[in-house]
Image (cartoon, helix red, strand yellow):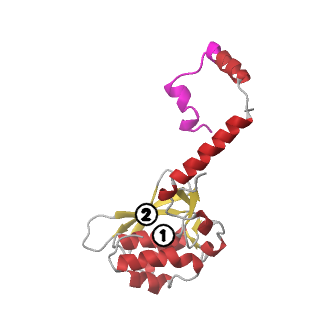
């Protein structure tokens, strides 16, 4: 089955001519992967400098996320998660597709007065671990989410005032364990109106 993005280049730019394909083939034969020691040392020096230059933007420590076992905690399926929100938290909520097979947008109606639902966060399907695991690039900067944590979803809902901390603790239980430190700091920060940490 062909997908739209499989043929996007040909559809928008057109197919390469035989002359262009021959030129690309000739170019690929002249390229090499070998380099001198001097070039490799210079590249290593630049990479080290780059790594140091971005250190001020490194707000998460990759070592904290190396072992994901403590972050797994309680695993909740996406269908179980929305049922808990509806039945135990009393929220009016639903999912919408996001165009990614493993992501759904969670929409929540804040209260009975609000005419429209708001997007609370995205969730991972078919299940979520308890605490988020970010992904990192070669410079150890966070680039996104490797595994979505359901407590991150609760934090986002709390931040948007869709659910209270008391309700979260009553229904989902108090966060515990070594992986809960960032979650608890952020929740305390929201409770005391300090902003995010």
Dot 1 falls on a residue whose secondary structure is helix
Residue occupying image coordinates x 63% and y 44% = 45
**Residue 2 within the segment the image draws in magenta:** yes
Q: Answer yes or no: do the residues labelled 1 and 2 have beta carbons within 8 Å?
A: yes
Segment tinted magenta in the rendering: 1-20
Q: Give the residue at mark 2.
A: 121
Residue nearer the viewer, 136 or 144: 136
Residue nearer the viewer, 191 or 20: 191
Residue occupying image coordinates x 49% and y 63% = 59
Picture coordinates of residue 183, whole percent (x, y): 48, 75
Residue 39 picture quarter: top right
Quarter holding the C terminus is bottom left
Q: Earlier in the sequence, mark 1 or mark 2?
A: 2
Picture coordinates of residue 194, whole percent (x, y): 34, 74
Residue nearer the viewer, 60 or 93: 60
Which class describes the residues within 10 Å of circle 2: few (<14), some (14-19), or many (20+)? Answer: some
Residue sitting farthest toward the top = 19
Residue occupying image coordinates x 41% and y 68% = 156
Residue occupying image coordinates x 42% and y 77% = 187
> Vertical placement of 3 versus 55: above or below?
above
Left or right side of 129 for 92: left
Left or right side of 69 for 149: left
Q: Give the residue at mark 1.
A: 152
Residue nearer the viewer, 141 or 94: 141
Q: Report if residue 30 is visible in the image.
A: yes
Q: Report if residue 86 is visible in the image.
A: no
Residue sitting farthest toward the front = 38
Residue 14 picture quarter: top right
Left or right side of 123 for 68: right
């Amino acid at each position: 089955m062909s997908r739209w993005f499989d043929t996007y280049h040909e559809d928008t730019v057109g197919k390469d001519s035989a002359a262009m394909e021959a030129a690309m083939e000739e170019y690929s034969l002249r390229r090499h992967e070998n380099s001198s020691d001097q070039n490799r040392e210079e590249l290593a020096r630049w990479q080290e400098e780059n790594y140091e230059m971005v250190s001020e933007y490194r707000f998460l420590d990759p070592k904290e996320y190396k072992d994901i076992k403590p972050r797994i905690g309680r695993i909740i399926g996406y269908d179980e998660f929305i049922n808990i929100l509806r039945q135990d938290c009393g929220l009016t909520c639903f999912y919408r597709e996001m165009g990614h097979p493993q992501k759904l947008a969670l929409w929540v109606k804040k209260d009975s007065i609000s005419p429209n639902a708001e997007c609370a966060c995205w969730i991972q399907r078919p299940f979520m671990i308890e605490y988020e695991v970010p992904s990192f690039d070669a410079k150890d900067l966070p680039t996104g989410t490797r595994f979505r944590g359901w407590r991150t979803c609760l934090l986002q809902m709390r931040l948007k005032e869709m659910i209270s901390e008391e309700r979260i603790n009553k229904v989902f239980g108090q966060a515990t364990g070594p992986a809960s430190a960032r979650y608890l700091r952020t929740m305390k920060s929201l409770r005391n109106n300090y902003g995010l940490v």
